[in-house]
Image (cartoon, rainbow, N blue to C red):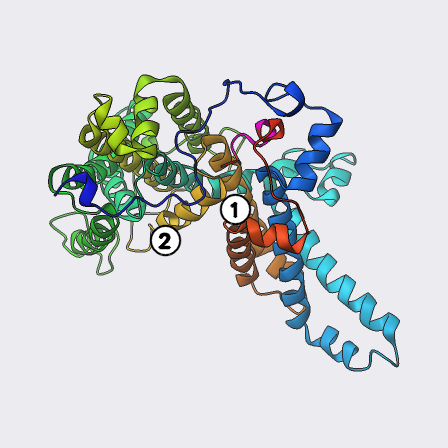
Amino acid sequence: MTDESLPAAPEPALAPAGPEPGDSAPAGNGAKRGQLTGSVIIQAITEGSPAVITILAIFLALVISALLIVFSDPNVLHAWGSFFAEPGTALSLTWTSVATAYSALFEGSIFSPATVAAAFHGGSIAAIFYPLSLTAFEATPLILTGLSVAIAFRTGLFNIGAAGQFVGGAIVAAWLGYAVHLPAVLHIGVCVVGAFVGGAVIGWIVGELKARTGAHEVIVTIMLNYVMYNLLSYLLSSPNLIQAPKQFNQVAPAIDPSAEFPHVGGPPPQVNAGFLIALAAGAVVWWLLSRSTTGFQFRTVGANPRAARSAGMSVERNWALVMLIAGGLAGLAAATVIQGGAPPPPLTTNTYGTYGFDGITVALLGRARPVGVVLAGLLFGALQAGGTVMQAATNPQVPVDIVEVIQGLIVLFVAAPPLIRAIFRLRAARVTGMEAVAKGWNG
């Protein structure tokens, strides 16, 4: 099957071959890209640049979620039942309900004013950074799986298999973590490399199948996800494989302490070295896509495979290579889960969670740009870290599912710029200098 007979690769509001950071292009009024002037900023706001669209999408998602918070509070609903008799009470309770929920969400993910005040009176200074450490911890695997999906996007491939690649990396990392005994630093490195290789092998299979047979990556990755889920279940069910001794549940032995990531912000539960790996991976992917010949080929293949082939590029080789890298990044996400935590949880059939599919959401919100993926991962990490606090701090409790609603609405609105422009009556955007402000978030 030839490339011409394949379905067109999805391009969800992406511009794989667009200008990268450092490029310059003519802008309105002769200004260069990246120059910030008052007219450029006003134009970006009125026309709805990608950065403005993203901000408005988050704002609109929070507004709609606030309505859901109000509707889930019986006290507020009762007050609104007698609105005409006591309008002040209804409005006050509505404001209190929403403000309490969002304040708890903020304090659980960014910082709490109470801990800052306590630090000035002999309290713990480390407690000030505890919410941020939780946000970074939650964001770490999301950033890596988001990068896995994003780098494939830039080559015109839709990697839905980050979940299966995550499992491949998790199996290797867990086995190396408990079966191999090495000094601390070396043991950590071996497990990280093993996780990358475990995920890369699964990703490479997808790329090779597409390159050699024309098999569509969406179908192959979906099927491989189920293969890896069931393989993990089988391995954890056999005492002769990776099931923990004297265990009847599907659980692997705990990894050695020498394989655990050290904490970089102090004692547990501060953020661990996995977050640094995620940031380093984001920097490497940015350099690869925007500063290397390989990245140029990836973007060219993603923009137009026929033109890339005519220019002498091996489209098939780039497909296989990018999926190998994408799988490795998902495997690194598994390493941060298997080797992170305080202490790290043992490998089970629940370890992979929804990281793989959340990575698709993060990549879409970050518009497949490395910096955007990191920011989107931090945003979703903050929502997850603050969601539990929000549920515990409100009475009656605000369902933690509200966080998932916020995430879904943000992606929905970001993926539909015309809807945002229609709601806020923005003019059709032109490609102008302000887009440089949104690098990492723009399309």
Answer above or below: position of 411 versus 193. Answer: below
Residue 429 in the magenta stretch? The answer is no
Closest to the observer: 86 or 251?
A: 86
Instruction: Check residue 353 in the rendering and tell me which mark sits there, or answer none.
Output: 2
Residue 437 in the magenta stretch? The answer is yes
Looking at the image, residue 124 sits to the left or right of residue 406; the answer is right
What element does badge 2 sit on?
A: loop
Q: Quadrant of residue 302?
A: top left
Residue appearing at x 67%, y 61% in the figure: 66
Q: Main secondary structure of the magenta part?
A: helix
Which percent across, then down, holds residue 323? 25, 36
The span shown in magenta is 436-440
Residue type at mark 2 is Gly
The residue wearing badge 1 is 380
Q: Nearer the viewer, mark 1 or mark 2?
A: 1
Looking at the image, residue 250 sits to the left or right of residue 100; the answer is left
Residue type at mark 1 is Phe
Residue appearing at x 19%, y 28% in the figure: 317
